[in-house]
Image: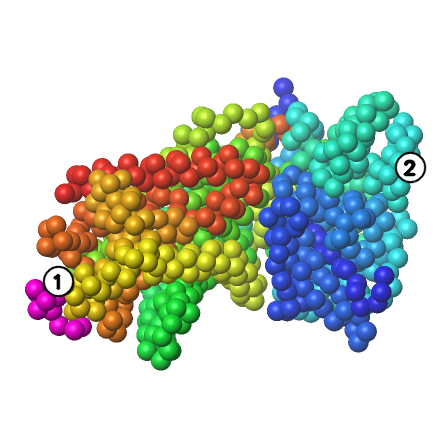
Amino acid sequence: MAKNVAEMLPGETAVIAGFSDEQIGLKLLEMGLLPGTAIRFNFSAPFGDPVCVSVSDVDLSLRVEEAATISIIN
Amino acid sequence: MEAGKLKIALTGKPNAGKSSLFNHLTGLNQKIGNFPGVTVDKRIGYCQLDNNTQAEIIDLPGIYSLYPRTLDEKIVTEIFSDQQNNLYPDKVVLIADATNLKNCMLLLTQLIDLKIPTIVALNMMDLAAKSGLSIDVKKLSASLDMPVVMINARKGHGIFELKKVLAQPLAASRKSVFQIGDEIKKVIGVIREKFQLATDYEAYHFLQQTDNLIFLKPEQRNEIKVIAKEHSFFPHKYQGAETIMRYGFIQELLNTAIVKPSHRDWKRVSHGIDKVLTHKVGGYVIFFAVLFLIFQAIFAWAQIPMDFIDSSFARLSNVLAKELPEGPFFELLSQGIVPGIGGIVIFIPQIAILFAFIAILEESGYMARVVFLMDKIMRKFGLNGKSVVPLMSGWACAIPAIMATRTIDNWKERLITIFVTPFMSCSARLPVFTILVALIIPDIKLWGFFNYQGLVLMGLYLLGFLAAILSAWGMKFLIKTTERSFLIMELPTYRMPRWSNVGFTIIEKTKTFVFEAGRVILAISIILWVLASYGPIDEMNAAKQVVQAQAVQEHWSEGEIQNRVASYKLEHSYAGKLGKAIEPLIAPLGFDWKIGIALVTSFAAREVFVGTIATIYSIGSAEDQPTIKLRLRKEINPETGGPRYTPAVGMSLLIFYTFAMQCMSTLAIVKRETKGWKWPLIQLAYMTGLAYISAFIVFQIMS
């Protein structure tokens, strides 16, 4: 099964493969999270949610449920 | 278009430096209004571009693309896709963050397809240089077919060059980024023909987000939907492909224009700060320390100017009362209008200080981390991480706070935030609190360190916060929605706040308060004075005789008689009658008819309580007016012979004011933001009910 961003560990990097949710996917695309782009998992908030990721030099916060819709390859 | 009336819109993603640039271009020559129909702040300023050209600059809310997510963002889409709009610009300045060009370009490519003449202002060149990034600006400009100006919006560098370019005639870029697919060309043609649109892309947006374009009439929107269906055009089907196509163009553009990419290292400091500020324990400790500092500032620092304002207005009112000739108009001036204005001005120090802090936190990038830290907790209570800013602003004034909820994209979470924000103790409650706390709580220190009065005050703020959070939690179960909630948000790089931006925020928020809430307060002050000064004529005329008759028996002095007459008149004035009418209702809370008058008048705005009390007690005395505090302390309860403001009465009043929705301006804003009377009325009933029951319990237990 393909891994998703919510399963990444701090410091881990991967390449975005696709989105499992159309609505969230459209929003993420607009923020520059395109399939094929590198994504880095920076850290998560104290209760494990939301998480902070970096995509092309931008730091983004995502909720875990949103991060889980981004499938990755690494 | 005549020369000298150029309309220029500033746009770009959030945190790209839009407001800095706006402030540099317009200076203090700006005004804040609302976009028609909605309460989204519209900032317009004027700027002399060169000797013959004056420009009207419109600052638009920050957006990433023309597909809006929040109410703020919808405005931008509406303006850019409606050439009939009053605000439709002649030219657009797109502020791009040079350190993060990729994210700024999506909107730019959309503007290109709308054929709007655009100039790119490449901001944060200093940071770009620091990060080792090197951009070939000439190539960028040539590939985009539009002028690109390098600026440093924080320091004001490049503004002169930007103005010069803006004054020149400007044509739209001849590029075309989004190639509309063959299968939808036909339907686009139909829409374009029907609505006489200038570009295909505009027609495409008519089809894509019909319901977001409020300038279209409902029947027009229906027509579009019918046409879309006929041609089997399904909105959103093409959006993903469009975005990917745009990013393809952007990547190609950046490949040629970026000579040397940035090294990741330059954000090291920012990431280091994040390690501390979002730490599991430390993050919260720091956040609460920041909150504590803000409180300290509001109470300690604001007290000095507030005392000064309080005594100045009391003195002014005295001087006027003495110097002006007698007559109803002059009495209205010295006893109604002057104290009324004083009651507004006194809040300015606190509102200014609170918004200074909020502006600093926003400018530095810390506020986004607060949202990040609090999101999980806030969601448990039916709120959103973004609710933190409105709730904190609620400490100053619920009006700007409720307007700040527009950044929350989910309707349910936004509604709950609006509903509970008035529970946060606003600065209008503070004068009520301070006076009553000073009256009933002794000014001594616990362990020689904590001031009892301060502790009680903090307790009241905490109580308001708990009421907010628990009500939110309850509402979470009552409101049903299928709309999803998102928190896809950029965490900006930390940087020093720009102090002039902080200054502009302070001015803006203070103005909002003075003009939105202030006019209600002033109007109520005047009405109150009339009510307290006039009553049924025969009763008012009888005052002298009744008192005179008593005076003979009691051997009163001339001065005593005058006071008694005034007090008799107040009791029989319309205000007195109103207070007495509700006395049975509020007696279980420990309130008498004088407090009743204050409750009725402060229904419009809480702080009027203090003014009312001041007016009520000052009308009864001809001597020089001391400050309100002293007047209250002297008040005697005729039933017990002891002071009127006992601890039980004081606490009951404090609790009542903590919970009650005593602010007409807030109700008006809630009505506007929720588009109807339903929510403000539920809010009013709920808050007043909670206030009554709580005050009842407190008074019955304490007495």
Percent coordinates x, y for residue B164 in the rendering? 80, 70
Q: How is the image coloured?
A: rainbow
Element at label 2: helix
Distance of mark 2 from mark 1, alpha carbons?
89 Å
Give the residue at x 27% y 68%.
B627
The quarter of the picture where the N terminus of chain B appears is bottom right
Helix, strand or loop for disc 1: helix
Q: Which residues are magenta?
A: B551-559
Decide if residue B519 is in sight here: yes
Horizontal side, residue B602 vs residue B170: left or right = left
Of residue B342 and residue B500, the one placed in the foreground of this image is: B342
Residue B591, relative to residue B53: is it above or below? above
Judge whether residue B527 is colored magenta.
no
Height in image: B388 above or below B525? Answer: above
Of residues B135 and B413, the one nearer the viewer is: B413
Residue denoted by label 1: B550
Residue B243 appears in the picture as rendered: no
Label placed on residue B193: 2
**Both labels 2 and 1 in a single chain:** yes
What residue is at 67 percent from the left and 60 percent from the top?
B44
What main secondary structure does the magenta stretch of the protein show? Answer: helix
Q: Position of residue B171 (x, y in %)?
A: 88, 57
Q: Residue at x 68, y 46 (%)?
A: B75
Q: In the figure, B23 relative to B227: above or below?
A: below
The three-letter code of the residue at mark 1 reads Gln
**Sooner in the amino-acid sequence: mark 2 or mark 1:** 2
Locate residue B683 relative to residue B627 in the image: left or right: right
Which residue reaches farthest top?
Answer: A1
Q: Residues within 10 Å of mark 2 (few under 14, many from 20)?
A: few
Chain containing mark 2: B
In the visual, does B351 lie left or right of B546? right
